[in-house]
Image (cartoon, helix red, strand yellow):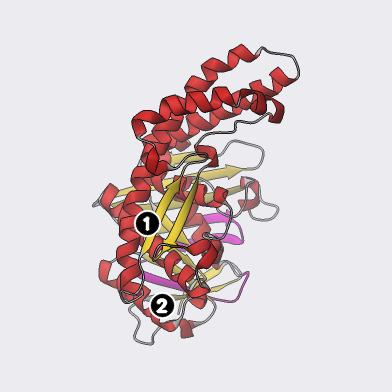
Amino acid sequence: MQVLKIRLKDFRNFKELSLDPKNVINVFLGDNAQGKTNLLESIHFASLGRSQRVQKETDLIRWEQPQAFIYLSFQKLGVEQSIAFEITAGKQRRILLNEHPIKIKQLIGRFNTVLFAPEDLFLIKGSPANRRKFLDAEISQASPVYFADLLKYNKILMQRNSLLKMIKEGQAKSNSLALWNEQIADMAVKIIVKRLETVGKISRLANTLQQKISEQLENIKIIYEMHGVDESQMLPSELYNWYIKKLSDNQKIDIIRGSTSFGPHLDDIKFLINDRDLRSFGSQGQQRTAILALKLSELEFLKEETGDYPILLLDDVMSELDIKRRKQLLDFLDRQKIQTFITATDSAYFPQDSNADFFSVKLGNIKPR
């Protein structure tokens, strides 16, 4: 996969931007708050239809302007395509795929990216919600069906939680929960089966990369943890009945709390290095190596699932990696021909003989160096 053109208008601090990246590795240098991360944000937005930095889309519109535009053309498996967004204050945004209007569910999986930002270094020690978000985004890019199932599950979950509150307030009867329990259980099975399959693949890929980075000293294992159950003792065929029983047994507690106490919305991921919990016992260096292996495994996973490498976005992470890991990363990307967009504040993070195109970013303007 390759980005061919990027056109921005009134997006963040870009009044107008026209960029035609030609190389595999593209490095954007500049001080902080000049627009480097904004560029990566626009590319990432094109893959998932949402920003990784803000909840309100209107925050993406340049100050005192009514609209923002994103246009991106790319080549995937030899076919050129385009995605465009029109974001207008007070209106629903428009998405165009090859100049035809589409909905968000038709966007997912068309253009794939992997983003590696400094906050990802805290993925292991961060909240379970962040790990679920990471996993869901990765699977959705590879499987639009999963994304549709996830949307449906979240909608059913909201409706069940709303009903729980109504029952607590005496506006509905508790026997009406049985139908919702069945729907929750049905969608939960679909989501968890796909998550288990994906975590198994990513764990295998990450371990191969972890061994290379650590020079065969470390093995990494990624485990999917179902809330309230040891997944090693639960077969997929048993999941539906297990959820029905759990939701029924905890019905009174759910009514009191106004929320659903079992489901994939509460699950987590666990990381082990040499069979030790990385969250509790891993050093900072081990955690950073594991995250680097995880991000590279995302690339390989999407390549296996879709037939093409995604676009890699590295947002100011070179300063977080030592010289050895930076070289390993750049060599891997150049060798695999994975188009990459890198932001940094200092060119010293890159070898002088680096096979990359360098750009200067200043006050929303980008120029070749």
Q: Residue furthest right?
A: 169
Q: Residue at x 56, y 60 (%)?
A: 125
Q: Left or right of 321: which side holds 255? A: right
Q: Left or right of 169: which side holds 227? A: left
Q: Give the vertical position of 359 relative to 38 (above or below).
A: below
Is residue 60 visible in this depiction of the protein? yes
Quarter of image, res 25: bottom left
The percent coordinates of residue 176 (x first, y second) are 59, 13
Q: Residue at x 23, y 52 (%)?
A: 78
Magenta stretch?
8-33
Residue under label 2: 326
Q: Residue at x 35, y 54 (%)?
A: 202
Is residue 184 visible in this depiction of the protein? no
How many numbered marks appear? 2
Q: Residues within 10 Å of mark 1 (few under 14, many from 20)?
A: many
Residue under label 1: 298
Q: Quadrant of the N terminus?
A: bottom left
Q: Nearer the viewer, residue 320 or 60?
A: 320
The percent coordinates of residue 254 (x first, y second) are 64, 28
Q: Give the vertical position of 139 relative to 40 (above or below).
A: above
Disc with the residue nearer the chain's start (1 vs 2): 1
